[in-house]
Image: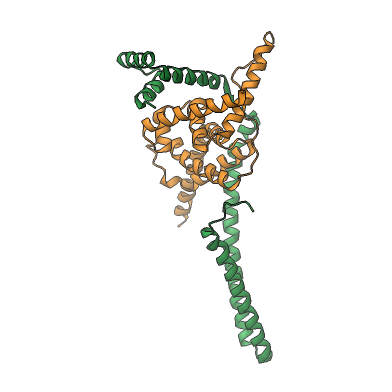
Chain colours: A green, B orange
Amino acid sequence: MNERFIILLEKYFENKLTDSESQEFETLINSNAELKQEFEEQNRIKEVLRKMKLKNPSREVWDGYWLGIYNRIERGIAWIAISIGAIIFFGYASIEAVNSFINDTQSPLIAKVGISILFFGALVLIFSLLREKFFTSKHDKYKEVQR
Amino acid sequence: MRNNKVSARTISKKKTKEFEVLVKDNMKRAYFCALGMLGSHDSAMDVSQEAFIRAYRNFNTYDTKRNFFTWYYKILRNHCLNFIRDNKNRKEEFFFESGKNEVSLNNPEQNLEEKEQLEMLHYAINQLETEDREIIILREFEGYSYEEISAMLNLPAGTVMSRLFYARKKLAEKMKRLME
């Protein structure tokens, strides 16, 4: 399609054609039947679009819009605080638990070894699952395919 | 130390207040842009609000000399595109209405014709590619100028004009096919 025609047409719709451009546009349309047809088609679709608008929701929706955002920001901050608190608390509790487990002289050695291997296995399993979730899925060529 | 705390809180309050004004000034266009792209009231509400939250978190990077909506629109657009990518089977609602404020009681034929046009436009727009749909919403429904769209989409004004022309052409073809 003639690029000049497109620019002039869009300017025509915006009422921004200068006198010389207006003349050029008219000459283009009148000298080329295909361009004239394009112009008429674009005019028709513009006319249809002019008659329509996007549905406006009720006033209550707008009244509660900012509050919805504010609540979500506030809750986001609350979740961050809870997460940080939980990490500190469980981190400290884990260190204490490991210390008391190591320093415990009453439990038999075989039980200590068993529990250590159990925790080691659980840690490897969690690490493996997390790696699969966060890294492998990024490189999945078929993730867009609907299963 | 106490003074620092107070001033930090004051800054935070000031930032929130300032942001609230910006949200209230821009929420309607944000919602309508999202509605045009996503085709559902609930999704448009959710995505436009989520984009405002992201904008709030990155508010320090916003250059106040620039237009807020142009800056915000880039965040909103990314959110909309992610939403479309992640929800391929989403259902779209009927999100157009007649531009007239009153329904003419004297001309039922005209009303019927407009209703049919509304339905056809809805189906035709739904069949368009996201980029075509977006540019039609921005220009024809939200009334942004080519320069504004150019800044929002990071495209030269000539490209905006050309894309708009072809988007309207595709829309006309789809509507014609629906009419047959």
Identified at 45% across, 21% down, the residue is A38
* Residue in front for this viewpoint, B163 or B157: B163
**Seen in the image, is B145 located left or right of residue B115?**
left
Of all residues, the one furthest to the left in this rendering is A20
**Position of B25 relative to A88 (above/below):** above
Q: Position of residue A91 (x, y in %)?
A: 58, 71
Q: Nearer the viewer, residue B73 or B155?
A: B155
The residue lying toward the viewer, choosing from A57 and A41, is A41
Specify the quadrant that holds the C terminus of chain B.
top right
Choose between B114 and B40: the one closer to the eye. B114
Q: Is residue B121 visible?
A: yes
With A24 as the anchor, is B54 left or right in this view? right
Where is residue B13 drawn, in percent x and y?
A: 50, 44
Compared with B176, B135 (above or below) is: below
Q: Position of residue A100 (x, y in %)?
A: 63, 83
* Residue B68 lies in quadrant: top left
- Residue in the image at 65% along x and 29% along y: A58
The quadrant of the rendering that contains the N terminus of chain B is bottom left
Image quadrant of residue A128? Answer: bottom right
- Please provide percent x and percent y for residue B55: 49, 44
Quick check: A140 left or right of A116? left
Q: Is residue B148 visible?
A: no
